[in-house]
Amino acid sequence: MSKAIEARGLTRRFGEVEAVSNLDLDVGTGEVFAFLGPNGAGKTTTVRMLVTLLKPTSGSATVAGYDVVTQAGQVRRAIGVTLQELSLDPMMTATELVALHLSLHGLGRDKEAAERGKELIAELGLTEAAERRVMTYSVGMRRRLDLALALIHRPQVLFLDEPTTGLDPSSRLVIWDRIRELHAAGTTVFLTTQYLEEADQLADRVSIIDQGRIVAEGAPEALKTEVGKPRLDLRVESGPADVDSILSGYGQVVRGGGDLVSVSLADEQSDVTAIIKALADAGATVRSLDLVRPSLEDVFIAKTGRRLEGAGKDADQLSVIAGG
Amino acid sequence: MANLGQVAVLSGRATRQSLRNPQFLAPVLVLPTLFLIAYAGGVAGGANLPGFPAGAGMFEFQLGGDMLLSAMMAGVIGGVTQVVDIQSKFFDRLLLTPTSASAVVFGRLVGIGMLGLLGGVFFTVIGLVFGGRPAGVGGVLMMLLLQVLTAMGFGAVTVAIALRTGEGNAVQIFLPLGIVLTMFSSAFFPRHLLLSPLDTVAAYNPLSYIADGLHAPWIGGLTATVAWRAVLALAVIWLVGGLLCARALKHRAEAG
């Protein structure tokens, strides 16, 4: 697979602080690549270097085959970007912003591009608001307009810097659907996020960055498999049975609060039915069971020793399996 | 080489940005109008002093000074709007297009020039309505051109500061500073009638020569010398502003 983004030893210092340290990246063409990390990890600094807004202190990077320092103009022709902070003029209308961007991309007289602008506005649900000034838009509408502007010139590589932060669930789903469509159409997407679920749902590959360094990289499933095995959480009325003894035959047993007991499974193909049957045969009653798979939060914890701050409910809903 | 079409689009957007914010228009139109009312009325007797340009009243003389003040305020507002773009990250969005950073900044400066032109037209109309008679179409065109170039020159300085600092406070200091600089020039009173040391300060203040160029069509005395001195003074301001802008852009690209 050809590379849409390649970075070698990419480093950015601000005074004494090394925001991004010796970063190597390879993103294949057509891939959705998620850059996951907490606030201040270096995600946005990396994006700003890759999109030519910030010069690296050292190292090199290419985007769509162009050097981000020496061929910045070509890079900007090839990319679409939504920044973490909404970058819209609140006094302009969506129609005016679309026209401005088409002109700045040299497509001001391109009727097909103008039509595409209208279609994008419509697809993102902004047609009725298109003639209103952006200052009257909700955050979700602004995010969608921001995305439309990033897509208007059909970029080869799309950078989305925390595109759903602060959005309501329905607006987030609109953005997710759009990313999936772009992926299907072959656009390379470089996505930074602090939402584990977002990375899990959308990305072909994930890179976890912490304190300016990449601590893990790979396909989400591979990363999760690497750090932990699936776990069966059971709530059991023991009766005469020695539940722990029975379960220990299937994997490591950990007691939770009350009647909760967890057993780590060798893999997802483990025979859950056999466990239930063994417990029943011994006189125990299984009141509930939950097969818990490792999450990207678990990967983050395993690699950094702490939870991913800002992961919000997504993280809270995911159970933690530390270690193997 | 900046694409002229893109510069035109960017300057149109910059002009609309100012026109859609009434608070940006007030310093360009209202403030100099208040100066015009105060000076033309309050010190009208100054026109009777020996050596005051013959055949001109204080109102006609003040028009040139107020046009200069208006152009400077347009420049300051240009810096303020640049800060607004930086803080809203819209400047980053513009830089993310294939348009060069210098074209983005030049588009802003042309927009500032358009704001200066608005002030120029406004005070020309005020002058005509209240009896002023500029020296023909050529004189009016020269005034308007000087107005545009002055606004752009000062705009280059304030935009450079905006690019360097990203701080509104750093740019807004030019609002009172611009008024003071204008007071220390021959904008509101003929230089040869100023007392020492103000007359010496005014002689070294490039604003005096731009003011002379703006006065001349209203009070008579439009000569080639007046014109080229105004252009030379503008060239100094443009050179300073241009160099500052170039350095600020370079700094911004490296510092992010």
Image (cartoon, coloured by chain):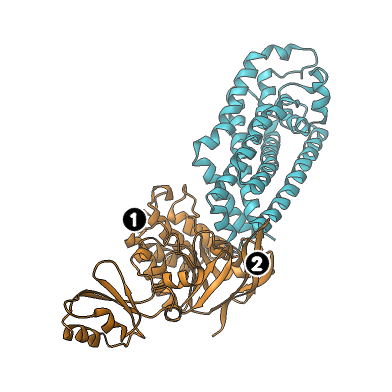
Q: In which quarter of the image is residue B29?
A: top right
Pick the quarter of the image with the N terminus of chain B: bottom right
Tint of chain B: cyan
Q: Quadrant of residue B185?
A: top right
Amino acid type indicated by mark 1: Glu
Residue A283 placement (x, y as % from top left): 15, 82
Residue B201 placement (x, y as % from top left): 81, 26
Residue A124 placement (x, y as % from top left): 37, 63
Location of mark 1 (residue): A128
Residue located 79% across and 19% down the image: B194
Tint of chain A: orange
Along the viewing direction, whichever of B46 and A163 lies nearer the viewer? A163
Indicate which disc residue A269 carries.
none
Location of mark 2 (residue): A11
Q: On screen, B101 above or below A4?
A: above
- The chain ID associated with circle 2 is A
The reply to whether residue A279 is visible in this rendering is: yes
Q: On screen, A74 above or below A91?
A: below
Left/right placement of residue A212 relative to residue A126 reads right
Residue located 24% across and 85% down the image: A275
Q: How far apart are marks 1 and 2 (CA)?
A: 44 Å
Q: Quadrant of residue A259?
A: bottom left
